[in-house]
Image: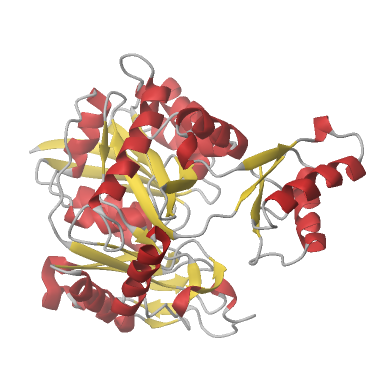
Amino acid sequence: MEKIGVLVVSYGAREVAMVDAFSRSKEYTIDLYIADRHRNPFNVERAKEHVVIPDLSVDKICRFAEKRKDKIRFGIVGPEGPIIAGVRDVVEKETKIPMVCPTREYAIESSKIAQRLLFQRVVPQANPRFKVFSPKDYSEISDLKVDLWKWLDELDNQVAVKPDGVSAGKGVGVWGDHFTDRDQLLENFLSNYKYGPVIVEEKIFGEESSFQAFCDGKNIIPLPETRDNKRAFDGDAGPNTGGMGSYKDVNNWLPFITQSEWENEVEISKKIFETLKGRGSNPGLRGIPFYLAFMHTGKGAKILENNSRPGDPEIQNLLPILKDDFAELCLRMIEGALNKVEFEPRATVVTYKVPPTYGGKMRAFKGDSKIDLSEAYKLKSVYDERIRVYPAAAELRESDTYALTSRVVSVVGIADDISGAREISLKGIDAIKGGGLWSRRDIASKEHINNSIEHMKMLRG
């Protein structure tokens, strides 16, 4: 087998799933050069060389790659921070190593306003109503407040307040979650507004799905749809998190979504792609330029946001059942030769185990943060390839693993139906000991899925 080196820029379990996929290659012998946020135990064990770059600085990543450029065939990036900061642009310019991720220009999530304006031009039917409030348009806060109040009247206060880019203010705020009266909303708004434009858009009600697509610049290949669960607690209660778990059905679409509704998502993504691609090919879009969060309203899907990187946890639902060799797939994207991507027709469920303070479950935790993954790993002898244990915010210190402050470890269950996959995922979760870790117990449960099915029936009328 041909031997190749692969650079992986890693943040958590999403990239561990990539490392796992590369490690299973049957086409290549792969040396992994991993630039990681911390000493992830999974990555450390599998890397040819592993370096910790806590801030994932583009310059530091580039220096790491530069010294090994003769050994590295290509690189791949999971987290959005380096992509938005232009890691592909810099690494390709300085080292000539081709990177599998969009260029800075096509990290369109860097401006929420530009993203909304693009969607309004290309797929207006999928765009929520929105209004931009810019400091250059108002000399007095009193004038701004008049217009803002008029907009809130029009939308009956049901809005999301979003800074245009990465802000030092309060960030995104949603009516009913972060504020329940206009004074609270104004406080959130002004904390963002002093740093630049703010977008206020209608709050969309429905059932959410995650759409991802691989791209080689010429073509996009839609991936099976997944459902992320962002709320911290069972029953979709509590604050939004980075994602407590996700599931995928045997089909390309979810149990509460029809085939035609999924095909509508595909058409929306293709229209956006064709607009950004222009004539011929646009290699700047290479990788996963579309990770679209859709809200299904019963009267068509609305785009909540798009990201130019794989979903976490959603990509973990897919890579373990990828039929294609992942390294070969990446090379096809680089060569502009991507024509299909095949997956096993199986269901997958991802559940995260998180620290005691995550999602506001506890204010403080003074216990030992050491965790034990050994029993979870032993389940491979029972379930073989139907289980994956992916450390995320878990750090190797000498020979022990410790939980950090974000999502600590995910377990992927794989089966012929969602129920079976969920059972395996929870078995793995229950086998992880220590650190006071906890998880949601209703990810992909029959009750949760049935609630979504009934909700969509009601929304469709």
Q: Quadrant of the N terminus?
A: top left
Q: Nearer the viewer, residue 18 or 224?
A: 224
Q: Quadrant of the C terminus?
A: bottom left
Query: Does residue 459 sit above or below 103 in this rendering?
Result: below
Left/right of residue 131 with respect to residue 184 in the rendered view: left
Quarter of the image for residue 75 reads: top left
Q: Nearer the viewer, residue 151 or 252?
A: 151
Quarter of the image for residue 9 reads: top left
- Residue placed at 45% from the left, 28% from the top? 103
Q: Nearer the viewer, residue 43 or 291?
A: 291
- Residue placed at 73% from the left, 46% from the top? 151
| Extreme residue in the top direction | 279
Residue 92's x, y, as percent? Answer: 40, 24
Left/right of residue 140 with respect to residue 151 in the rendered view: right
- Residue placed at 37% from the left, 30% from the top? 271
Residue 233 visible, this orientation: yes
Residue 183's x, y, as percent? Answer: 82, 61
Q: Nearer the viewer, residue 292 or 66?
A: 292
- Residue placed at 32% from the left, 57% from the top? 226
Residue 37's x, y, as percent? Answer: 48, 53
